[in-house]
Every structure is written in structure tokens, then in C-alpha cells.
Image: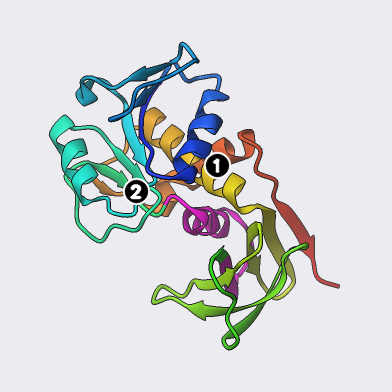
Amino acid sequence: MKIAIHQSGPIGGRAASVLLAERRLDLLGLLDQDPAGDPRVVRVEDLSQWDVLVSDTSTPTTLLARAVAADIPLVLSAELAESASIPLFAEASLVAMARCLEYESDIDSSLVAITRPGTPLRKGTRVVFPPPIGSLKALRRRDGLLVAPTDGDWGGLIISGNRHSTGVADHAAFLAGIALAAAAIVMATSDLPIGAVRVEDVAGPYLDAAESAGLEIARFQRP
């Protein structure tokens, strides 16, 4: 497995660390950067020779063009509304983690919520995340997902039904790295169709990769 990574911030660095711990990784390529240290890390010279390109950039349009030109799948932590002529896994973040958990769980979910870095809201829907995060106010996206800004070091998600819940809480940077790296592993090892990935096509392998990287999922039943 050969994964090329474009790092524009700390999430990319975290994802690179997760990928270097993956036993199936043969090479990690740095796009537009020079490597140092680990012999498995090299500079990308010909992007078309790699299995997938992954990035934490917040402006992914240029990278999409480069991945299309190289005809390799693309994984992004950011949202991307554009259509693609390659397999594309966008929002490889707590968003993907929550949606995959929702799909794989047997919970008839009435609430799916994630945290994101930011100033906590004073108004919104009250969501109780697993400790030590606790209660936060959240706003609902168009797709129904609740997003709760937090200025703490911890991040997480919660999927709640009438009787059962599933949750995740850990250091936000650690979770972001796992979320991005797990998507890269799935895209590098799966034969997926052109266009945006569907949750039902990647949920199982994605969560397997995330748990192998250290993701801990809590499942509990309400009294």
C-alpha cells in the first residue's frame, strides 16, 4: 500500500503518524515536501504511481485536479461539493466517523452529533457527549447532523436512540488524525466506483481501520 499525503496543517501530520503505524503500508509519500528520517517516507515524484492521495487542506479544489490528472482516488478532511471523475472520500473527519457508526450500529438513532473546534454556542440543541466532554449546544446541518463547537482539547460524537447509545470521546487532534488516515487506508485497499463514496460501501472497513489505529467506541444502554 502506497499512500501519498499532502499536509497543510496538524491534522495531516497526525494522519501521517497513524499511517506509519499501519502494518500494510509500504511507502508514505510526501507531496510538495521533502522527507526526513523514516525510510518508508519519500517525496512524491509521480503521483500516478501511488494508490491514493490524502490531504487535510481546507481548499481542496487544486488537489482534486491533481488527483484527477493522476487518476488516483482522493481523500479529504474537508467537505467538497464538486463532482469527481475519480473515487472521492470527502469529509474524512468526525462526520465520516459518525455516519459510519450510525450505519453499522443497530440503533434507531434519533440524534447524531459531533464536536468541532470553535467557540461554544450559547443557544442551540443541547447534546450530552461522553465524558469528559459533557453537555454542549449544537446546530443542525442540512443533512440532520448536529455540530457542537467546543474550545476544549477533547472531541467526540454521540449516536443516541430510545434505548441504546454509541459514543466516542478522545483528544480532538488524535481523532482527526485517525478519521483521515482510516479513510486513506480504505481507499487504498478497496475497489470503489467513481464519484463520492457511499457510507454503505465503506462503513465496515472504515471502522475496522479506525479501531485498529486506536479508536475506542463506547456502547451503552439507557436504564
Residue 27 in the image, given as x and y percentages of width and height:
41, 17
Residue 59 in the image, given as x and y percentages of width and height:
28, 54
Q: Nearer the viewer, mark 2 or mark 1?
A: 2
Residue 178 disc label:
1
Instruction: Tell me which corner region of the image, top left, top right, bottom left or bottom right, holds residue 35.
Output: top left
Residue at horizontal 48 percent and vertical 32 percent from the top: 16
Q: Which residues are magenta?
A: 92-114
How far is the residue under mark 2 from the one under mark 1? Answer: 16 Å
Left-right relation of 130 to 174: right
Q: Secondary structure at mark 1?
A: helix
Dot 2 amino acid type: Thr
Residue at horizontal 33 percent and vertical 28 percent from the top: 33
Residue at horizontal 58 percent and vertical 88 percent from the top: 123
Mark 2 surroundings: few (<14), some (14-19) or many (≥20) residues within 10 A: some
Q: Is residue 153 depicted above or below 36 in this figure?
A: below
Q: Which residue is mark 2?
A: 57
